[in-house]
Image (spheres, coloured by chain):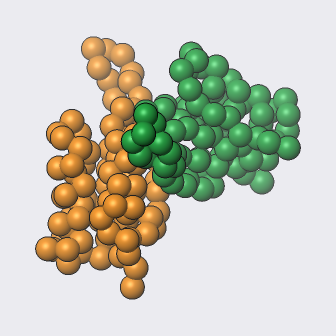
Chain colours: A green, B orange
Amino acid sequence: MDNSILIGEKPFMNYVTGVVMQFTSKGASEVIVKARGKFISRAVDVAEVTRNRFLHDIDVKDIRISSEEFESEGKPVRVSNIEITLSKRS
Amino acid sequence: MDNSILIGEKPFMNYVTGVVMQFTSKGASEVIVKARGKFISRAVDVAEVTRNRFLHDIDVKDIRISSEEFESEGKPVRVSNIEITLSKRS
């Protein structure tokens, strides 16, 4: 079962609702909030708003950052990634 | 000794150079890259570029996210923070 949510440019609350629903309706014990590039700040906001305003029994279990390299128009491009693992307190 | 670097809107490489110098010229064993709000993505980029392009003996030791709440024009405002601790491999 994939409990990950990729943050992009949809309305902010869509993502928060998505995370909340994974924990509540779908009974997930962990949800991974993922983003790349400029959406990384937003992923942190989604995690923080979920934890502080909606679900108070959620901890940040792990945060990983990494780089992805690819070619664009013949030039090497590097983009950062983040994965924030949110976990339900047991 | 405070080995932290706060990421803002200066040119990107200023921050990378700042982190590299803390490790090399100043002999720091750890450097904390901090940012808030929209600069969080940039902090991740600074950490990743430092590790991947400049100093290959640096690990991400810890990443913390948090929220700061304050009032602006009478309204409550929440802003996210990140602290990325980079550590020299021993």
- Where is the N terminus of chain B found, in terms of image quarters? bottom left
Task: In the displayed orientation, state which residue is furthest to the front.
Answer: A74
- Residue A34 locus on image (x, y percent): 60, 40
Residue B71 visible here? yes
- Where is the C terminus of chain B found, in terms of image quarters? bottom left
Q: Quadrant of residue A5?
A: top right
Residue at 76% over, 28% down: A21
- Residue A59 locus on image (x, y percent): 63, 49
- Residue A75 locus on image (x, y percent): 39, 42
Say if B7 sits above or below B69 in the image. below
Residue at 24% over, 71% down: B23
Q: Nearer the viewer, residue B1 or B30?
A: B30
Say if B1 sits above or below B75 in the image. below
Residue at 41% over, 29% down: B78
Q: In which quarter of the image is residue B56?
A: bottom left
Task: In the displayed orientation, state which residue is furthest to the left.
Answer: B25
Q: Is residue A68 left or right of residue A58?
A: left
Q: Is residue B7 left or right of residue A85?
A: left
Residue at 64% over, 19% down: A14
Q: In this view, does A17 lie to the left or right of A45?
A: right
